Image (cartoon, rainbow, N blue to C red):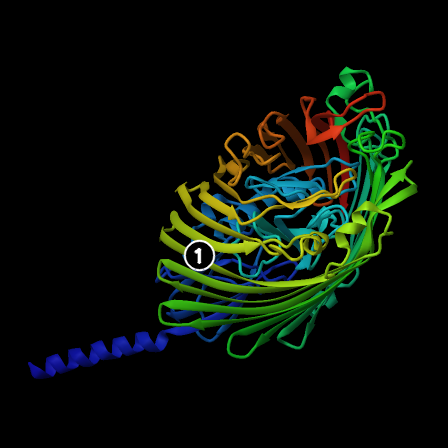
Amino acid sequence: MYKAILITIVLIVQLSYSKIVAQTNIKGIVIDNLTGEPLELAGIKNAGTLKNTLTDREGNFALKNILQEDSLTISCTGYKTKKIKVDSSKNNLIIKLEKGRIDLREVIINSHYNNLTASHTLSRIDLDMQPVKSAQDLLRLVPGLFIAQHQGGGKAEQIFLRGFDADHGTDVNVSVDGLPVNLVSQAHGQGYADLHFVIPETIAGYDFGKGPYYSGKGDFCTAGYVAYNTINVLDKNMVKIEAGQFNTIRGVALLNLLSDNAKNKGQSAYIAGETLYTNGGPFDVPEHFNRYNIFGKFNTNIGADSKLTLSLSSLSSGWRAAGEIPNRAQAEGYIKDPFGSIDSSQGGYTSRVNANIKLTSKLKNDFTWENQAYYSHCYFNLISNFTFYYADPVNGDEFGQHEEREIYGYKSTLTHQDYFRNATLTSTAGVGIRYDYTHPSWLAHTLNGDSILNFIQLGNVKEANANAFIDETLETGKWLFNVGLRFDYFNFYYLSTAPASDTVAVIYNEVNPSQDKSIISPKINIQYTLNPKIQFYAKLGKGFHSNDTRVVIANLGYQILPAAYGADLGINWKPLPRLFINTALWYLYLQQEFTYGADFGDESVEPGGKTERKGIDISVRYQMNNWLSANLNVDLADPKFIDSAGGHNYLPLAPTLTSTAGLYYRFKNGFNGGISYRYLHNRAANSDYSLTAYGYFITDLTINYTTKKYEIGIAIENLFNQKWNEAQFEYKSRLKYETTAVDEVSNTPGVPFFAKLKLSIFF
């Protein structure tokens, strides 16, 4: 009896011991099978325990307590799912995934996702689903983000997001490979974000976030941020030519510079070029818009644990512009149609050169250290006329804006992961510095586009931003907690060199040309994943946007860095295997919105008061079958001035309702494309809504035939040839034969039906 019990106990202990011995901890990396590039946010699931994890930015993952008989399922959006058996003799796995069609059935709401889960999921689906035709289309990929071009194609687009008319980037932080796009204290507008130096075909992916909730994002991240990443390794060479209406022609080439042997050694290099010419539309004054881009990127491994990336890019662009036209101009016969011009001297020239170097190192004990340095040289010259003969009835109100700028920057981040029994703690600390210097920056009253009558503003801007942040993310069970703290210090310097006779010079007389300020921005994000179908999240955060240095100095440093406070409450939901829904209720309060009269005839500098915005964002992605998919975005916002009386508290041009949707197909025989719309509702053009900026509903169509060797296609913008206004502004303007000024909306007409053919060769 006792002997039998003893034998049973021994057998149980042996079996338990064998189980323990068979357990192992596994680390590995997930990469693209063609390029060898690491895949971020690939999911690794243990079929035995159902425990799962995600790869980090470098494709690395770790799983604990894996049994010998367990199998792993590896999946990544846009790649074919792979299953492997655990081999305890191999602790460091290299898993290669093959590209495939996106299948929403494989998109799982995962408790390990960080607080950008929805944006990562949506961005990967949308970039795969929607054909990108231009740099502007890159911005339109962000759900709820609308843009408007109103000065001849070469200017940065006006950006609308979450109830913001963010001008050219005042409240939206934009970057490419970590290189900042926004220009502080720019001659045309604070936060000016010109993405035209990006060749769309070089974009590998993008990330976005709405609201001020992200420790790694500082200046301009109030409405949100958009971060693009370019391709590291080309999987094929490409030459493309496009041609369409309005004398449009575009050429693009992407070429590998190193052999496959170099790729096997961890080295790669490619060069990309783009040239574009178009008249932009049926304007009486042809835009003659031209753009030349070149981009090169080099990657190499340094030892076993470090990777160096170097990229260089250059943009050169020139154009003419019909300008913004008062609504009354056509009715009263000043122009014959919406595409006429009152001042044919408008237009501009811009250029930008960028150098970007990044070193990423895997250190001992699960530390990752990333260092980045960048440099940009920017040139900008723009001639505009919005008010015509309002300020100067003799010479007219034409004005020029000009600057030449150098940007120097450096940032360093250190990341560490600690693995506990049922939890993972990810710690990130970062520091950075950015210095901008203009030589000079000016605003001038001009004549015929080339003669300066007098300077309205002339001087040199120097602006420095030093920052640091810490970010802690604890993942345990179904919960995720993220806490961050960011510190930013700014030094603003503006030396006015305008002649004493210029009226604006008095603003800067006997004022301190230097001001500084610091701000601390806390962030809290909480996430609860009920199951693989439902996830809830809450976000709280403080952000800010810096103000134009000229405004800061003129206002003697008052409210230099007004704060923004935001809150989101959202859900990620998969009610059906091929249906993904993201919904968020949000609120945003801004302590101050400065308004700055940078245009001719308005030289005032004054605070704009407190504002609040609240709304709801809805994004839906649905895959009907293996070849047909759809998306829908609906974004509602209620933007208001808080300090203004009722009826006078509208935020001019702030969007209140936007929507985009599309139906996309991809057949096995090579045909692919889609039809989509974008809708912008009517909105207030001034603070009492006595003037209206009218909305639009525009439909686009793409049809492609794609093979391994070539692709042919057609893209049609404004399929139904709708008459619409792309950009609208309130101005007090006076036309040449008018005796008094009129306060009304001026507009830039949107492009009519526009068809473009393309041919791409792959080799």
Q: Which residue is more in the foreground, 576 or 526?
A: 526
Residue to which mark 1 is pinned: 525
**Kind of residue sitting beneath label 1:** Asn
Quadrant of the rendered image containing residue 409: bottom right
Q: Secondary structure at mark 1?
A: strand
Q: Residue furthest left?
A: 1
Q: Is residue 534 visible?
A: yes
Q: Which residue is more in the foreground, 688 or 329?
A: 688
Q: Position of residue 83 (x, y in %)?
A: 47, 58
Q: Is residue 233 above or below residue 592?
A: below
Residue at (91, 43) in percent of width and height: 452
Residue at (62, 63) in percent of width and height: 517
Q: Residue furthest right?
A: 451
Q: Position of residue 680 (x, y in %)?
A: 59, 30
Quadrant of the rendered image containing residue 433: bottom right
Q: Is residue 412 left or right of residue 25?
A: right
Q: Which residue is more in the foreground, 583 or 523?
A: 523
Which class describes the residues within 10 Å of circle 1: few (<14), some (14-19), or many (20+)? many
Q: Position of residue 671 (x, y in %)?
A: 65, 34
Q: Which residue is more in the foreground, 314 or 17?
A: 314
Residue at (61, 59) in percent of width and height: 33
